[in-house]
Image (cartoon, coloured by chain):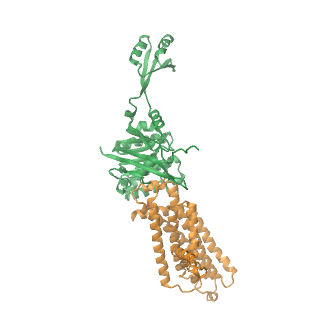
Chain colours: A orange, B green
Amino acid sequence: MRTIWLIAGAVFKESVRDRVPYAMVVFAVLLIAASYLIGQLTAGQDMKTIKDLGLSALSIFGLFIAVFIGIGLVSKEVDKKSVFGLLSKPLSRTQFILGKYAGLVMTLAVNLGVMTLAYYAMLYYMHATTLPGVRLAWPSPAMDPRLLIAIGLIFAELMLVTALALLFSTFSSPLLATMLTLGLWVAGHFNADLRNFENVVDNPAAIAIARAAYYVLPNLAPFDVKAEVVYGMPIARRVLGFTLLYALVYITLLLTAAVTIFRRRDFK
Amino acid sequence: MAAAIETEALTKDFLTGFWRPRPHRALDALTLSVEAGEVFGFLGPNGAGKSTTLKLLMQLIYPTSGRATILGRPAGDLDVKRRIGFLAENPYYYDYLTVEEVLSYFARLFGFSGADVKTRIDRVVEDAGIEPYRRMKLRALSKGNLQRVGLAQALINDPELIFLDEPMSGLDPIGRHQIRDLILKLRQRGCTVFFSSHILSDAESLCSRVGIMAQGRLVASGEVSELLAFELKGWELVVSGLSDDVSNRLRPRVRSITPLAHGRFMLELAPEAEPEKLIAEVRATGAQLVSLNPVRETLEEYFVKQVTAAQPRHDHAAEPRKAK
């Protein structure tokens, strides 16, 4: 366990000093700030727009960080052969993969944390500069703590995406791994449509393939509760718990696959 | 003395080609034994199988067949990894970490902690000659200094056995001299050194034994003195005060006479020329003997001979296409 944390610590240190994630976080913070201006253009919808845009910015830039750092760190380690030095030390390949993953998740958590602080600062500004009478028209308070549920689910989704990126980077080139990860992220958000495929198609084979794809591909739609949170609608605890359990199981499977591939790999 | 490294018919095939992958034999049945405490030079031209062997020993790649043991245990064993050091060819570590951070990271992976880590870092940065750069990020270092960082990390656990893949690569003459001194120091400490190189002068001056690889096969191995001892190629005799008359008289019995500076001449003699007789004759004419040296085959010449003699193998990848 100590070894895994050591590797995670090095990944974290290396990635927080890299300027790319900073640039992404700065860009996300700017976008969150810009949502204030956009909110001004939508009469009566300003708070909902700001909340929605802010959460979307968090989600998209979190995705970029997860994919680019996730793939970059492992691929770079293999391409530039630093993996040679590391794997000659007393650590197993399993510890290497788990350590990398833990480090990436730590990096993601910090970046998401910074973006969340910026988001709440923006919402606080909105709250402080709005008349109490106008605030009453909002479906939920500006600094609604339930936003953290949405951010928590974005984090869980990004942990899953990071595991996907890590898996692909164990056997494919960085470009292919990026395309596969982003492709699965998009597919994952439309996965629910595959379940209802029989409503639009009669072919039993196509229905069976769609059903199989539904179970194999990650289902990322349940992680998106932006609408519920922004409009003040309830989120069932059971659904929340099941979504987190789903993330845990799926991440475990992805990491098991990544470890299995990585353990057998020849580093030429 | 116990063997530090032993391989038995170690073989590695790589698949080449995208549509119809065919096996290419990178290492062919390598059987080798390196004794504890010796400096073993693993020599060969590019593509001879040196790095493949090192990667197999480090279990960065898995053998197609055969076996390898290090310090009496299978290659890749975690307990063995605690006792060895490895410097990869053209090492790269982490751009955004400092030299100290990288070394501290590697020391902690060995389970060292607290003041012990600092003591070890102090020792290895001194040994590798990177003391002035210890607080610099790796991305700011030159290739030669990165090579030194690689060497420092390989020494962090005070290994019993160290593997160095092309340790002189990227180093200036001073750097190479420092690495040579370091290898000698390691030998004095009783550390077994296994290093691959194609710089033969380094191997000749450092190694107790060498192995020469060509086309994935071990084509020669043994003590340097043993491999070269029987190959006396002639004698070099330097004399001064040789008159033209004497010089013309000796010319049919020597291979060549070359005038040197300050009235000296170098006489090249065949191995069977009996230099003692010639010296006596030359002295009788009033000339003086300056030096007499046997000319032996250098490791480089031996190497070229062995590598050239190695026959091409007939594996699938190497097989020429049949003419239509």
Q: Residue furthest front?
A: B324
Residue B310: give x, y in percent of width and height: 46, 38
> Which residue is situated farthest in the left direction here?
B1
**B250 shown above or below A190:** above
Q: Residue at point 64% right, 80% down?
A: A49
Query: Picture coordinates of residue A193 (x, y %)?
Result: 58, 78
Quarter occupied by residue A189: bottom right
Q: Is residue A120 visible?
A: no
Residue A224 rendering spot, x and y as whole percentages:
56, 78
In this image, B79 relative to A20: left or right?
Answer: left
Q: Residue at x 43, y 24 (%)?
A: B234
Picture layout, residue B181 above or below residue A266: above
Q: Which sits in the foreground, A90 or A121? A: A90
Work out whether A32 lies above or below B261. Answer: below
* Front-most of residues A62 and B197: B197
- Left or right of A67 on screen, residue B305: left
Q: How many marks?
A: 0
Q: Could one spot residue B234 in this view of the protein?
A: yes
Percent x, y for residue A82? 48, 55
Q: Image quadrant for the N terminus of chain B?
A: top left
- Check the image and report above or below for A244 versus B4: below
- From the viewer's side, name the closer residue of B21 and A241: B21
Tell me the quadrant of the picture where the C terminus of chain B can be found.
Answer: top right
